[in-house]
Amino acid sequence: QVWRGTPAAEAGMQPGDVVVEVGGVGVKDQFDICRIIFNHAVGETLRFSVRRGMETMLEFDLLLQEFPEQP
């Protein structure tokens, strides 16, 4: 899932992209992604490696920001 207005959306990540690595660490599920992100500070940049479709691999450098408040 990619929420509108987030660094992921602004960088070009799309719903359906599968995150395979964050900050050089392989991930198996969303909990791994959260654990890695929460071990870094707002303002740091992390590289996300994602698989789009069956063969396309992409990399995105995302600036960590505070999670926006939900209305």
Image (tube, rainbow, N blue to C red):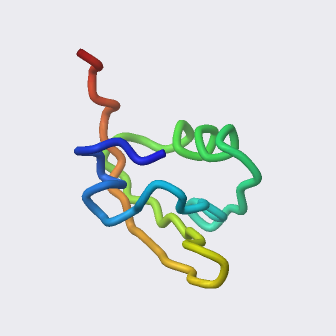
- Which of the two residues, 19 or 65, is positioned nearer the viewer here? 19
The picture places residue 58, in percent across and down from the top left corner, at 49, 78
State which quadrant residue 11 falls in.
Answer: bottom left
Question: Is 4 on the left or on the right of 57, as rendered?
Answer: left
Residue found 53% across the figure and 36% down from its top: 38
Which image quadrant: the C terminus? top left
Q: Is residue 42 left or right of residue 16?
A: left
Residue 52's place in the image compared with 62, above or below, is: below
- Labels in figure, total: 0
Which residue appears farthest toward the top when viewing the image? Answer: 71
- Percent across and percent down for residue 21 are 63, 64
Which residue is found at the position 60% from the left and 72% from the top?
A: 51
Q: Is residue 12 left or right of residue 21?
A: left
Q: Nearer the viewer, residue 24 or 29?
A: 29
The answer to which quarter of the image holds residue 42 is top left
Residue 31, above or below 61 = above
- Rendered view: 63 above or below 67: below
**Extreme-right residue of the structure:** 28
Which residue lies at the image location 38% right of the left edge and 59% below the top edge? 45
- What percent of the width, then of the height, locates residue 26? 72, 62
